[in-house]
């Protein structure tokens, strides 16, 4: 066999071998270079959580896009795949919307964040003298107690400062179902809610408002949450449950996990991102400290996130390992 023939022969063997290997080797799915779209809402903790997750995904070489979205309405985008990840769905306010979305099969719960949610009516300790029956919710039914929480715009009814309307929470329904002589006024933003608390607290002025945890407020200010009848699913779903046989929501708010959720197609299109998001975990103390740095110490969210990333490199690096 000539040299030229031997070369052709050996080359042919090489091609054949490569074809054979290709035939038996499993195909590896291409990882999408499209950006993972994470939703941003209107409270500091959620902005921190989301940007932490985004920075971690960037470290894994994944493109990220932040999209401003309504807290409850975002589930429409998560179902269609126009949005991909929601880092904070609170058991207290978002469970019903999350359950409805997951029932379609187009949204998946990616597990708990590690943080525990509490949201309820809250008042400063100095208000207890004017309404000594607190924290029992029934004290609020007394006209004198309600008047102690009144302002010029609500008198003789008490004033309850709720969160932004987009947060849900059923406070208007709760007032009606429990027969409370209070008027619900919704703060325009998270910042406005706590600015009003700060102002009232400094002046020892009357205030009853929505406070949530994890947050710095329950640690900074002395006060108590109102103790409503304990939440059950039946309270929200069945008007016959509870003290008011004709109306639902005659109980307090649920408490529990803060969940991660998103588009069900995430695990196939971005498997590394899917793993990292499922692994992501923080606790209330960590989040409370970061919120304090932003809201009270005046630091930028980006700087707080960068500080956490630097201090916890070994931890988040493990989250992005396949």
Image (cartoon, rainbow, N blue to C red):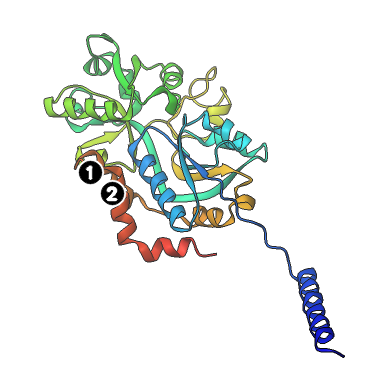
Look at 18% across and 25% down and name the residue there: 200
Percent position of residue 75, x then y: 56, 33
Percent position of residue 279, x then y: 49, 57
Look at 40% across and 19% down and name the residue there: 175
Lower sequence index among marks 1 and 2: 1
Residue 287 left/right relative to 273: left
Q: Nearer the viewer, residue 212 or 33?
A: 33
Look at 28% across and 49% down and name the residue there: 304
Q: Residue furthest bottom?
A: 1
Query: Quick one: quadrant of the C terminus?
Result: bottom right
Q: Quadrant of residue 150?
A: top left
Q: Nearer the viewer, residue 98 or 273?
A: 273
Residue 228 visible at all: yes
Q: Residues within 10 Å of mark 1 (few under 14, many from 20)?
A: some
Residue 132 left/right relative to 21: left
Residue 189 left/right relative to 28: left
Look at 27% across and 35% down and name the residue there: 224
Residue under numbered circle 2: 304
Q: Secondary structure at mark 2?
A: helix
Q: In the displayed structure, would residue 321 be above or below residue 149?
A: below
Q: In the displayed structure, would residue 59 be above or below residue 266?
A: below
Percent position of residue 307, x then y: 28, 54
> Are dots 1 and 2 in contact, CB under 8 Å?
yes
Q: Residue furthest right?
A: 1
Q: Secondary structure at mark 1?
A: loop
Q: Residues within 10 Å of mark 2 (few under 14, many from 20)?
A: some
Percent position of residue 273, x then y: 53, 53
On residue 234, which mark appears?
A: none
- Marks 1 and 2, how far apart at CA: 7 Å
On residue 299, which mark appears?
A: 1
């Amino acid at each position: 066999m000539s040299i030229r023939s031997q070369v052709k022969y050996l080359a042919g063997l090489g091609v054949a071998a490569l074809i054979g290997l290709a035939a038996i080797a499993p195909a590896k799915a291409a990882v999408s270079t499209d950006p993972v779209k994470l939703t941003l809402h209107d409270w500091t903790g959620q902005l921190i959580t989301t940007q932490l997750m985004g920075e971690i995904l960037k470290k894994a070489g994944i493109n990220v896009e932040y999209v401003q979205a309504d807290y409850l309405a975002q589930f429409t985008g998560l179902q269609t795949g126009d949005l991909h990840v929601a880092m904070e769905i609170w058991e207290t306010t978002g469970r019903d919307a999350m359950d409805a979305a997951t029932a379609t099969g187009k949204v998946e719960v990616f597990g708990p964040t590690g943080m525990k949610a509490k949201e309820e009516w809250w008042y400063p300790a100095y208000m207890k003298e004017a309404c000594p029956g607190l924290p029992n919710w029934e004290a609020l039914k007394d006209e004198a107690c309600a008047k102690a929480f009144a302002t010029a715009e609500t008198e003789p009814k008490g004033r309850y400062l709720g969160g932004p309307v987009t947060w849900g929470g059923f406070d208007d329904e709760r007032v009606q179902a429990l027969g409370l002589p209070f008027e619900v006024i919704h703060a325009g933003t998270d910042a406005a809610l706590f600015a009003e608390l700060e102002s009232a607290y400094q002046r020892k002025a009357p205030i009853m408002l929505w406070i949530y945890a994890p947050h710095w407020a329950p640690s900074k200010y002395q006060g108590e949450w109102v103790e409503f009848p304990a939440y059950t699913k039946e309270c929200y779903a069945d008007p016959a449950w509870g003290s008011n046989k004709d109306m639902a929501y005659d109980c307090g708010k649920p408490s529990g996990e803060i969940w991660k959720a998103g588009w069900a197609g995430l695990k196939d299109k971005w498997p590394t991102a899917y793993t990292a998001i499922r692994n992501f975990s923080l606790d209330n103390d960590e989040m409370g400290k970061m919120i304090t740095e932003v809201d009270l110490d005046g630091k930028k969210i980006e700087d707080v996130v960068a500080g956490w990333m630097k201090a916890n490199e070994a931890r988040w690096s493990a989250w992005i390992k396949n």
